[in-house]
Image (cartoon, grey):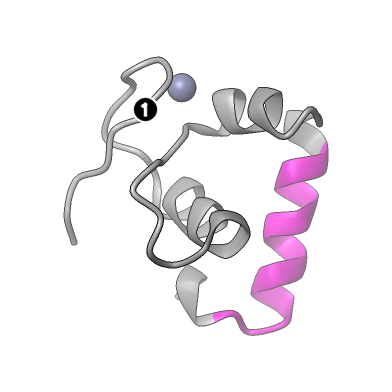
Amino acid sequence: MKRQICCSCGKEPLSRDEVGVCKKLLGVKTRNFFCIDCFAAYLDTTVDELLERIEEFKEEGCKLFL
Ligand SMILES: [Zn+2]
């Protein structure tokens, strides 16, 4: 798996969850990846809410998080 860097703050490497949620919400072909903090700000939501959504995606068995 390619190392992904947060396109906003430059944090690296991004965790599997961070990459997965970016793909899930921005589309699998996205070239923009965010760390969880920047992605929450980008989506105008909170980190907690984003973490909750990640858990939901995992429960749905989303392949992006395996
Ligand atoms: Zn960041």
Q: Is residue 63 above or below residue 53?
A: below
The picture places residue 33, in percent across and down from the top left corner, at: 41, 41
Cβ(mark 1) to ligand 1 < 8 Å?
Answer: yes
> For residue 44, which quarter of the picture?
top right
The image shows residue 56 at horizontal and vertical percentages of 77, 67
Q: Viewer-proximal residue, 19 or 7? A: 7
Label 1 sits on a secondary structure element that is loop
Whole-percent x, y for residue 24 in the image: 57, 64
Q: Which residue is mark 1?
A: 7
- Please state the horizontal and vertical placement of residue 51, each as a whole percent of the image: 71, 46
Q: Quadrant of the C terminus?
A: bottom left
Residue, x 49% and y 60% (percent of image)? 23
Which of the 4 quarters of the picture holds residue 26?
bottom right
Q: Residue at x 38, y 64 (%)?
A: 29
Mark 1 Cα shell of 10 Å, populated few (<14), some (14-19), many (≥20): some
Residue depicted at 40% across the width and 15% down the height? 9
* Residue at the extreme top of the image, as rendered: 9
Establish if 9 lies above or below 47.
Answer: above
Write down the region rendered in magenta: 49-62
Left or right position of 14 against 36: left
Placement of the N terminus among the 4 image quadrants: bottom left
Quarter of the view holding residue 36: top right
- For the residue marked with disc 1, what is the amino acid? Cys
